[in-house]
Image (cartoon, coloured by chain):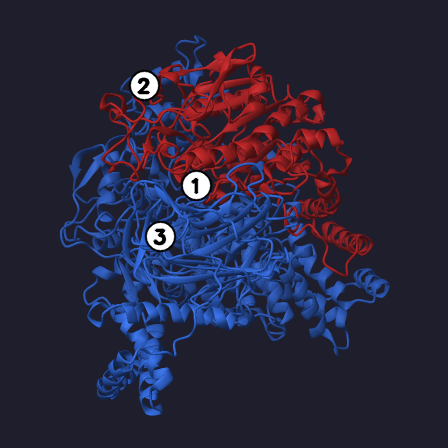
Chain colours: A red, B blue
């Protein structure tokens, strides 16, 4: 797991707090905090994955237009969805008052793919070719029915703000593998859908009550890739080096005179900042990538800020030891114009995501990298607004949605879970948000019940007081 | 050495009798209370260990047994077995009679006569040091000390004059400084989760700065802490509540508020009330109540029922969970004194203007009717050479058009009828005759309903999506000219936004240059500012697709009316576009019988007539009326508002919510408090005011303990209780229990005098010690064998740089400001990238950091980088991390670079520039070697700003020593 096994051994031996482990990584501990941190020995289990690449489809992709094929719905198309199916489901304020809720079969063609013969929509031809690498969970569910609580739930284990994000937990638990890159990096791309993209929230990569050195670092596609990375005009690298040498000499004198070990940490952080000024541009410089690789990710691969470019960067970060690589692709909220907008969104992500899997595999990284693809919830079987021959929308739906996993010790070629004929309720093997997070943590070597942090008198976990590892999907 | 460290940190003061709170409770709380504590429902085996009565011999048997089925804590809890030492401790306590105690924080405070003097603080600190074989360190150098106190009391470095004063005098100046209240406010804003946006989903702006200013002023006026608190919790319920007292109640309106359409109103309304309970309990009682939202608290004596009794105090605000306004009611509009005067002047000007206009109006109306009857010929001309013209009326949609979708409807348009679109129907017409690659102008009238739609397109639905499209998005017009979608295209959007549900003329003008600069958009004849999102067009726009009105391709249907679409084969000049807009509108009005005209249309016609044919005095009277109206409206819009608490006449019924679920109400409850802390006195009113008074009742020991702990932390970096948000059973016990109790009792006896308490603390020898690390143990300085030190907070770091450089604008209060921040941060997270951060110009760049605009979903990077909270939830303690991103910010952020330049500039002309800068930043002169290093840097690069910048980055500068 660690770049330096002897260090891990040392930590285990002394039972030092998790936070202090990060000292040699990007993050330094909160020196005054140690007493409040839990004492754990790590890893709890033999890890199957070293890192996560999380391809978050922000807005909630339509499961029944992409993966959860319901051919029999055609017979119901245009008819009211039976109340027995809807049951006591909480509907959002956007369609709870809608008088007619016509069943809307998918307008897209599905076909079977791979050895597993899984159904995949025509909108995802590249993904379909990788289907035997994927574990498709069609039985995800969440209690949240609106974006803000649902995304916050999936990424922090709680619908209301205030908890650390997944990546922050991982940074806290594992520290960094990399000497000169953050352990948790976030990249955002804008979808092609015409509908405006829903907002994101800094809390989704925030550290909550964990020390703030565990928060995600945004890698931006314009301006400085990392905030404040570039030296100002008039200060070249040699001048900066000279300045930092003088600064370090002065600070070392202070360390000798004053004795506060924080000063030693500070000196190290300035040095790491200097290294990052070289390592981050090296990360984002794609000139070393072969034309074949660039081409495999599709036409957007060399355009900064696209999902394709971010996928390629994700692979480069995986190679460089970043622990949690979080991508957001915005624009999946198809309340209306689903047929046109969903097509555009799929075109954005299909080829790059498939290429990422292939690229990781070819480099021998897929086994140790867990790739997650999915959004915060699914979409309704019935149309939001008027159902027209070629146009309709779908509202949010938390009772079932589809998400796929690949690599990182997850069983490939598996279709897990089953929904009813209306793609409304789960009939077999439900996987709750907490179950997913428990499983992801498990693959990284954590018992989700023991990765805890004491805050306000309580030992908090990513999975709150819930979650079970879905052993059926483990390789 | 290892042994020494262990002694300091882990061993209780040994050898004496076991004391329940000190020795026993921590063991039981950590290992047993989760199943055998105050939570009645979750209790296992009917065994309760937080109060007397259990079979303790059995307890010892179960924690020592080797039987895996019997051992406690059970393996499923993931808790390790009790250590031998812990078991011994329990045994000795049981042998001595197993005396229980109330939790330490709930024990009464000692009786004292008045506040605590510095010497009394020192005697208690010294006693505790002596027990550990330690003593107070020698005092820090006087200037170091003055800098320390200045940073702790005002958050700013000392001025030169202050550095030359005796310490005691410097402390008095600092306590009297107006910056004292600013610095004191920061920790309070963290607790109050103060922000300038609503926080959920759309994260819209809100105004709360009047409340923030109230806090600053209260601090500067040294308002006693009990009054400061009661006013914020229940100022509106005080008899004869003043405006200022009502503003103060904003404390409990600072919580986040949700505008996400689809959210369930009651779910979020309940969330706000819960947030108030949590925040209030953490702030005043240092307790975490959140657990009791779903079940009895597992560690502390707060039952679920009591939680909802507290809930009922805060449940009676006339508010909504799904907010409909950026400043959700109840709000107060609070004109400043100058605004009040200006408003009254504006109102009287308006009434004068109206009176003067009335007689003129009558005369003008007559002349206007006469002019109208003579078929006026002097209207601005319409463009004559349209290659395509679609009138879009019922009788004539336009030559060559076809209709798709549901049957069309029509409504009154700008001229005659207009077609009504509802995203299910659209109009098509072949684009033959129109060449999109040559210069052109497209004009049309929109009366839009929805937030997003495509009123006009000429674009391929698939593939390269070649062509052009106009997209209405919340009043902004997006124009895309596409050769290859996403790659070769011009994409622009207007910065200006039009209102919906009113007619507006839109003209798009393109010169064929394939540059965004060649594209212009006009709203009602006026040019707009365009935000260029892409400017990479390098090919033709030509396509065989038809023109579609009311839809893009398969999707993006438009809601609203469209009228009079024209395609012109030239880039019309701006004057002609202005005339077109005005001329077409006037023609439309004239074609409508006077009695059917809207009032605004009649006014429009009248203004045109006056402009062309009115006499100067009539024009003057009209101008004055319009100006006076506009001036009054502008003034009214500028009156700041602030969110406040209000009580409904009939309180909302409060219920225990099963498992904390808003839709699972159980037993009805009445207002009440956790009585384990202090009893509820019958003479208190059962509302927020009663609750606030209960906090300060003589029987309540917790409020004072929590408050002094926070003020202690302001000076020492950490409280005497190191878990300021948890004074409960799971929190840490105080490092100096007697000191905490005496300080708390003294604070109360002395009338809750905040400045007096801070004065005693900073004048103590404990505070004045050198902060050098002379003992290797105790890295966290729990026993206070050295003075406080450590990295400055986000705000103080920036404020210090501004103060040293002379850039600081020391104005107090006012609306939040926007200093420098890298571009693109708001766009990356906001709804469709619509929100942009526009840095202020002038003073706003240089104000103290507590005035920086707080956007919860994209906090300022300074705060994010240096452990500032997001202000989503109540924060009682900030972490203090050290990261390379912090180094990057201090090295490369614009503010710090400009500060370095100004700092260097300020040193010019001084005899010893280097010494002056070094002392200003650190409080001391550099030694010879330090001079040599910095002087060398200056000589090698011939740059004083580089030296200033290096000094600003010194550990000694960015830390308190």
Mark 2: few/some/many CA within 10 Å (<14, 14-19, 20+): few
**C-alpha span from label 3 to label 2:** 39 Å
The residue positioned 81% from the left and 56% from the top of the image is: A239
Q: Quadrant of residue A127?
A: top right
Residue B765 seen in render:
no
Residues tagged by mark 1 and mark 3 found on one chain of the structure = no
**Quadrant showing the N terminus of chain B:** top right
Q: Are marks 3 and 2 on the same chain?
A: no
Q: Residue B487 location in percent, x, y?
A: 63, 44
Q: For mark 3, what is the residue?
A: B397
| Left or right for B8, reference B693 | right
Pointers 3 and 2 in contact (CB under 8 A)?
Answer: no
Q: Say which label, 1 or 2, has the lower sequence index.
A: 2
Label 1 sits on residue: A162
Which is in the foreground here, disc 3 or disc 2? 3
Which mark is in front, 1 or 3? 3
In the image, is A206 to the left or to the right of B779? left
Which residue position holds label 2?
Answer: A75
Q: Is residue B767 visible?
A: yes
Q: Are marks 1 and 2 on the same chain?
A: yes
| Front-most of residues A229 and B280 | A229
Chain that bears disc 1:
A
- Local secondary structure at mark 1: loop
| Residue at the outermost front position | B399
- Which residue is painted at 76% across and 55% down in the image? A247
User: Where's the C terminus of chain B, which quadrant?
Assistant: bottom right
Residue in the picture at 25% in, 83% down = B370
The numbered mark 2 sits on a residue in which chain? A
Q: Quadrant of residue B448?
A: bottom left
């Amino acid at each position: 797991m660690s770049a330096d096994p002897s260090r891990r051994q040392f930590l285990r031996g002394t039972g030092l707090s998790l936070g202090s482990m990060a000292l040699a990584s990007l993050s330094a501990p909160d020196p005054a905090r140690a007493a409040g941190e839990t004492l754990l020995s790590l890893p709890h289990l033999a890890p199957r994955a070293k890192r996560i690449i999380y391809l978050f489809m922000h807005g909630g992709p339509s499961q029944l237009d992409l993966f959860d094929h319901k051919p029999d719905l055609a017979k119901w198309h245009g008819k009211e969805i039976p109340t027995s199916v809807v049951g006591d489901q909480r509907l959002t304020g956007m369609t709870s008052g809608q008088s007619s809720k016509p069943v809307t079969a998918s307008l897209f063609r599905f076909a079977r793919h791979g050895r597993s013969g899984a159904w995949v929509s025509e909108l995802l031809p590249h993904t379909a070719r990788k289907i035997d690498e994927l574990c498709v969970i069609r039985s995800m569910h969440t209690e949240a029915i609106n974006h803000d609580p649902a995304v916050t739930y999936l990424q922090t284990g709680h619908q209301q703000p205030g908890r650390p994000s997944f990546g922050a937990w991982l940074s806290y638990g594992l520290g960094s593998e990399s000497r000169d890159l953050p352990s948790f990096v976030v990249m955002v791309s804008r979808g092609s859908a015409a509908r405006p993209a829903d907002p994101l929230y800094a809390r989704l990569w925030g550290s909550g009550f964990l020390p703030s050195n565990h928060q995600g670092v945004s890698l931006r596609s314009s301006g400085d890739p990392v905030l404040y990375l570039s030296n100002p005009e008039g200060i070249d690298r040699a001048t900066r080096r000279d300045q930092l040498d003088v600064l370090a000499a002065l600070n070392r004198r202070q360390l000798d005179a004053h004795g506060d070990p924080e000063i030693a940490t500070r000196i190290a952080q300035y040095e790491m900042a200097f290294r990052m000024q070289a390592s981050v541009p090296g990360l984002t410089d794609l000139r070393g990538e072969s034309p074949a690789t660039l081409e495999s990710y599709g036409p957007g691969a060399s355009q900064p800020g696209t999902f394709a470019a971010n996928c390629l960067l994700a692979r480069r970060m995986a190679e460089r030891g970043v622990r949690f690589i979080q991508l957001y692709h915005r624009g999946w909220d198809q309340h209306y114009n689903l047929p046109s907008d969903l097509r555009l969104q799929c075109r954005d992500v299909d080829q790059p995501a498939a290429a990422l899997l292939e690229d990781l595999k070819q480099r021998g990284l897929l086994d140790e990298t867990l790739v997650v693809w999915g959004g915060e919830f699914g979409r309704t079987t019935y149309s939001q607004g008027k159902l027209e021959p070629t146009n309709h929308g779908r509202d949010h739906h938390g009772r079932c949605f589809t998400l796929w996993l690949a690599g990182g010790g997850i069983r490939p070629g598996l279709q897990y879970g089953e929904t009813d004929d209306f793609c409304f309720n789960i009939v077999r093997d439900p996987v709750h948000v907490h179950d997913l997070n428990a499983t992801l943590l498990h693959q990284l070597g954590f018992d989700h019940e023991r990765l805890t942090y004491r805050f306000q008198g309580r030992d908090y976990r990513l999975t709150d007081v819930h979650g079970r590892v879905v052993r059926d999907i483990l390789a | 050495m290892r042994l020494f460290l262990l002694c300091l940190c882990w061993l209780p003061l040994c050898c004496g009798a076991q004391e329940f709170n000190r020795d026993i409770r921590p063991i039981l709380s950590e290992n047993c209370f989760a199943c055998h504590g105050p939570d009645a429902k979750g209790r296992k085996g009917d065994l309760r260990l937080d109060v007397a009565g259990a079979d303790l011999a059995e307890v010892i048997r179960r924690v020592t047994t080797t039987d895996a089925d019997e051992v406690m804590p059970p393996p499923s809890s993931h808790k390790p077995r009790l250590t031998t030492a812990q078991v011994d401790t329990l045994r000795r306590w049981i042998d001595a009679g197993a005396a229980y105690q109330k939790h330490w924080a709930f024990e009464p405070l000692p009786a004292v006569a008045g506040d605590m003097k510095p010497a009394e603080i020192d005697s208690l600190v010294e006693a505790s040091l002596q027990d550990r074989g330690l003593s107070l360190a020698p005092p820090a150098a006087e200037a170091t000390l003055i800098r320390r106190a200045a940073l702790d009391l005002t958050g700013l470095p000392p001025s030169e004059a202050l550095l030359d004063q005796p310490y005691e005098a410097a402390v008095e100046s600092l306590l009297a400084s107006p910056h004292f209240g600013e610095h004191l406010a920061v920790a309070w804003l963290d607790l109050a989760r103060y922000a300038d946006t609503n926080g959920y989903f759309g994260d819209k702006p809100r105004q709360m700065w009047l409340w923030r200013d109230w806090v600053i002023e209260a601090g500067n006026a040294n308002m006693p802490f009990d009054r400061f608190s009661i006013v914020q919790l229940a100022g509106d319920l005080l008899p004869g509540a003043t405006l200022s007292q009502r503003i103060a109640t904003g404390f409990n309106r600072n919580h986040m508020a949700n505008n996400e359409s689809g959210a369930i109103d009651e779910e979020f309304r309940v969330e706000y009330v819960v947030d108030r309970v949590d925040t209030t309990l953490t702030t005043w009682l240092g307790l975490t109540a959140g657990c009791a939202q779903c079940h009895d608290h597992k560690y502390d004596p707060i039952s679920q029922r009591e939680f909802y009794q507290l809930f009922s105090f805060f449940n009676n605000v006339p508010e909504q969970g799904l907010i409909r306004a950026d400043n959700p009611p109840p709000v107060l509009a609070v004109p400043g004194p100058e605004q009040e005067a200006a408003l009254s002047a504006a109102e009287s000007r308006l009434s004068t203007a109206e009176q003067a206009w009335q007689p003129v109006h009558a005369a003008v109306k007559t002349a206007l009717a006469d002019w109208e009857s003579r078929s006026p010929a002097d209207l601005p001309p319409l463009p004559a050479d349209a290659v395509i013209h679609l009138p879009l009326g019922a009788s004539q949609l336009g030559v060559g058009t076809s209709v798709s979708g549901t049957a069309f409807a029509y409504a009154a348009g700008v001229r005659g009828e207009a077609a009504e679109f509802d995203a299910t129907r659209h109009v098509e017409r072949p684009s033959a005759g129109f060449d999109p690659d040559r210069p052109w102008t497209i004009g049309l009238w929109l009366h839009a309903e929805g937030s997003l739609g495509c009123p006009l397109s000429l674009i391929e639905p698939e593939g390269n999506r070649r062509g052009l499209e106009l997209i209405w998005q919340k009043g902004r017009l997006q124009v895309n000219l596409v050769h290859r979608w996403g790659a070769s295209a011009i994409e622009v959007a207007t910065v200006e936004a039009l209102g919906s549900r009113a007619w507006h003329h839109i003209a798009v003008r393109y010169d064929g240059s394939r540059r965004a600069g060649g594209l212009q958009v006009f709203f009602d004849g006026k040019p707009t500012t365009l935000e260029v999102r892409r400017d990479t067009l390098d090919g033709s726009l030509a396509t065989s697709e038809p023109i579609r009105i009311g839809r893009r391709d398969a999707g993006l249907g438009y809601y609203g009316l469209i009228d009079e679409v024209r395609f012109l084969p030239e880039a019309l000049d701006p004057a002609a576009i202005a005339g077109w807009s005005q001329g077409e509108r006037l023609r439309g009005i004239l074609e409508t019988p006077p009695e059917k005209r809207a009032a605004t249309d009649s006014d429009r016609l009248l203004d045109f007539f006056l402009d062309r044919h009115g006499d100067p005095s009539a024009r003057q009277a009209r101008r004055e009326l319009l100006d006076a109206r506009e001036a009054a409206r502008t003034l009214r819009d500028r009156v700041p508002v602030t969110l406040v608490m209000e009580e409904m006449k009939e309180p909302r019924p409060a219920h225990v919510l099963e498992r904390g679920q808003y839709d699972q109400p159980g037993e009805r409850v009445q207002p009440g408090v956790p009585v384990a802390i202090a009893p509820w006195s019958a003479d208190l009113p059962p509302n927020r005011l009663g609750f606030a008074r209960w906090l300060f009742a003589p029987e309540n020991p917790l409020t004072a303990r929590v408050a002094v702990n926070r003020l202690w932390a302001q000076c020492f970096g950490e409280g005497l209780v190191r878990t300021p948000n948890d004074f409960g059973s799971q929190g840490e016990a105080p490092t100096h229990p007697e000191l905490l109790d005496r300080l708390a009792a003294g604070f109360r006896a002395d009338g809750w005098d905040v400045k007096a308490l801070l004065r005693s603390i900073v004048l103590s020898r404990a505070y004045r010690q050198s902060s050098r690390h002379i003992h290797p143990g105790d890295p966290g300085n729990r026993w206070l064998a050295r003075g406080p030190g450590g990295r400055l907070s986000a705000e103080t770091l920036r404020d210090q740089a501004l103060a040293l450089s002379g850039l600081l604008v020391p104005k107090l209060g006012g609306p939040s400001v926007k200093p420098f921040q890298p571009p693109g941060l708001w766009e990356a997270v906001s709804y469709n990238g619509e929100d942009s951060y526009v840095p202020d110009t002038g003073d706003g760049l240089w104000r103290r950091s507590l005035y920086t605009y707080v956007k919860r979903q994209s906090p300022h990077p300074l705060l994010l980088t240096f452990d500032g909270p997001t202000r989503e939830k109540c924060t009682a303690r900030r972490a203090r991390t050290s990261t390379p991103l912090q180094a990057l910010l201090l090295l490369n952020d614009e503010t710090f670079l400009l500060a370095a330049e100004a700092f260097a500039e300020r040193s010019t002309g001084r005899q010893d520039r280097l010494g002056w800068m070094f002392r200003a930043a650190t409080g001391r002169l550099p030694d010879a070697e330090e001079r040599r290093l910095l002087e060398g840097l200056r000589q090698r690069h011939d740059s004083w700003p580089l030296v200033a910048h290096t000094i600003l980055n010194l550990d000694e500068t960015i830390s308190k020593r």
